[in-house]
Image (cartoon, helix red, strand yellow):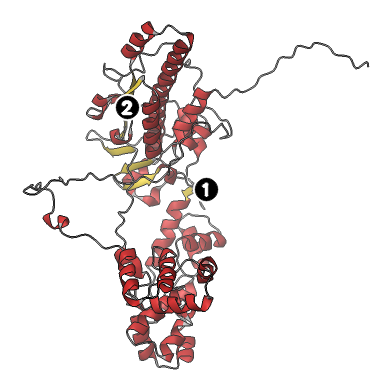
């Protein structure tokens, strides 16, 4: 066959990821904090976007679903709940035209692309969700007044930080500027617990000084307040605190050298290595338990990071459950169509017209994507409530085994869509705050051939059995297997051991030893 150039027609199908489709997929898996940051960035960059201030006061009815009582979602068939249309208002989801919006068949959120798409324009924001605080204080000069909700003492006092506390002692105890410089570097190497997280030899290399001088400075700073600061491990932290109390005798030092035996409650070996009797050993253990393994904790004033739920769930007075989106985490944006129409009239250059058209289309897509994201989250959450109805009514023992496919088949979406929806999304329920992924658990077969049990409920059952143990009756893993099989749960011994370890429960030998010893 001759090798000659020729023209050829070929028909093939390819998957094209448009920027709008990438945006829809990306928004679906963002957390509430990441979504808020992304929307704020879009508001700054797009003059045709504006916040919907009215949406913060009144929640749309379309953001709520009612799950009938006793409906476990076992029957597929789409939505079976009441969902009214949103009231008339300035929501531009209905104002966008077909020329800028995708068709209903496109379903940009319901597609599986292997979770691979371009990262252009992705806002890199931490997934943590901090609690926001507003400053209630009022600044003013002499003669100014304080609000009723402001503490007067807060204007006179200020919490001292650990760094300030240590720097004050450093300036008092050291006069040589070299020692002070070494001390500053040592303070910078402390972690949140007050332990030395780095190698002091690195300071010697950085400052070009003798390692012995760094060690000497460290030894002096280990006498700083609070006791136990600048320790390099748990043993040293406890030893520094005992030295401060003048209780670091040879017997106590031997006990600190064998903390692993103390963790195992191996009393016989501890009595031998410490060369004390049982009463003295009990007193020594009580002294160790009274120490603080994290001496810097009292100086940490960081507020615990709170999680704001994306979905709110509560009982319906008429029976069943009400599932609704949290309006505090739901951004509302509008396309300013009047402004777009006004500036379009004055646009004469082709470049200006193209810019306005691109901004309008981008704004319309964002509004559409946000609406689709909200509806998809609500749909998945409502189906989860249906499937796990018994859990919300009777507790964790009745948590059903569930996989992504079970939800995807009922709501007629792809598993990848359900996976994206349940990532970094939390639901507030009468039984607490849960990540949506919590409700997906593997199944444990039933010994009687009935309905399978969820892994979470089996773990709860194992913990309950162990909590009910007595010193004379400590169950081994084999005995737990037999008890579970008597309850209709078919489980292997290695699975019981794995679940017990994930619950941080020691072995039967260690539990028996702990219950027998009164330490």
Local crowd size for mark 2, using a 10 Å CA cut-off: few (<14), some (14–19), many (≥20):
some
Q: Looking at the image, which residue is at 23% across and 44% down?
A: 134
Q: Position of residue 411 (x, y in %)?
A: 45, 29
Q: Residue furthest right?
A: 1
Q: Residue at left 42%, top 14%? A: 356
* Residue 519 in view of the camera: no
Q: Nearer the viewer, residue 255 or 204?
A: 204
Q: Is residue 190 above or below residue 488?
A: below
Mark 2 or mark 1, which is nearer the start of the sequence?
2
Report the residue at 46% width, 73% height from top: 233
| Coordinates of residue 98 in the picture (x, y in percent) | 44, 11
Q: Quadrant of the C terminus?
A: bottom left
Helix, strand or loop at label 1? It is loop
**Of circles 1 and 2, which is in front?**
2
Q: Which mark, residue 332?
A: 2
Q: Is residue 269 above or below residue 337?
A: below
- Residue 183 in the image: state x and y as whole percent: 41, 70
- The reply to whether residue 31 is visible in this rendering is yes
**5 or 401, which lies in front?**
5
Mark linked to residue 449: 1
> Gap between marks 1 and 2, in whole Å?
50 Å
Say if mark 1 contacts mark 2, CB within 8 Å. Answer: no
């Amino acid at each position: 066959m001759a090798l000659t150039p020729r023209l050829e027609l070929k028909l093939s199908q390819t998957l094209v990821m448009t920027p709008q489709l990438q945006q829809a997929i990306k928004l679906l898996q963002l957390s509430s904090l990441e979504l808020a940051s992304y929307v704020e960035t879009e508001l700054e960059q797009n003059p045709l976007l504006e916040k919907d201030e009215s949406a913060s006061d009144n929640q749309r009815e379309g953001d709520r679903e009612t799950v009938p009582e006793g409906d476990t979602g076992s029957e597929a068939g789409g939505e079976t709940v009441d969902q009214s249309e949103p009231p008339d208002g300035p929501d531009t989801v209905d104002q966008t035209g077909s020329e800028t919006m995708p068709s209903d068949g496109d379903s940009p959120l319901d597609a599986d692309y292997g979770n691979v798409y371009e990262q252009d324009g992705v806002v890199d924001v931490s997934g943590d969700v901090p609690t926001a605080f507003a400053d209630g204080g009022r600044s003013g000069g002499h003669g100014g007044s304080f609000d009723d909700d402001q503490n007067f003492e807060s204007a006179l006092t200020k919490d001292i930080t650990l760094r300030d506390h240590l720097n004050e002692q450093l300036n008092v105890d050291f006069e040589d500027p070299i020692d002070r410089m070494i001390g500053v570097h040592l303070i910078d190497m402390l972690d949140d617990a007050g332990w030395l997280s780095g190698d002091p030899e690195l300071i010697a290399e950085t400052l070009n000084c003798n390692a012995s001088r760094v060690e000497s400075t460290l030894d002096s700073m280990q006498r700083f307040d609070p006791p136990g600061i600048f320790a390099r491990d748990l043993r040293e932290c406890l030893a520094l605190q005992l030295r401060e109390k003048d209780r670091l005798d040879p017997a106590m030092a031997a006990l600190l050298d064998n903390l692993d035996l103390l963790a195992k409650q191996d009393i016989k070996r501890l009595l031998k290595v410490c060369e004390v009797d049982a009463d003295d050993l009990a007193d020594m253990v009580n002294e160790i338990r009274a120490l603080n393994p994290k001496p810097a904790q009292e100086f940490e004033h960081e507020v615990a990071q709170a999680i704001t739920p994306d979905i709110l769930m509560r009982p319906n007075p008429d029976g069943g459950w009400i599932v609704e989106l949290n309006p505090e985490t739901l951004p509302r944006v509008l396309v300013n169509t009047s402004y777009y129409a006004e500036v379009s009239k004055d646009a004469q250059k082709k470049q200006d017209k193209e810019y306005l058209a691109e901004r309008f289309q981008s704004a319309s897509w964002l509004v559409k994507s946000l609406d689709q994201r909200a509806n998809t989250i609500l749909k998945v959450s409502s189906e989860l409530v249906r499937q796990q109805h018994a859990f919300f009514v009777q507790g964790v023992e009745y948590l059903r085994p569930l996989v992504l496919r079970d939800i995807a088949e009922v709501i007629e979406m792809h598993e990848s869509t359900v996976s994206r929806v349940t990532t970094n999304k939390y639901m507030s329920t009468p039984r607490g705050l849960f990540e949506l992924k919590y409700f997906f658990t593997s199944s444990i077969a039933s010994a009687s051939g009935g309905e399978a049990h969820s892994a979470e409920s089996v773990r709860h059952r194992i913990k309950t059995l162990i909590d009910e143990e007595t010193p004379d009756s400590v169950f081994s893993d084999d005995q737990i297997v037999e008890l579970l099989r008597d309850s209709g749960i078919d489980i292997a011994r290695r699975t019981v051991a794995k679940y017990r370890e994930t619950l941080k429960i020691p072995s039967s030998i260690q539990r028996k030893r702990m219950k027998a010893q009164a330490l």
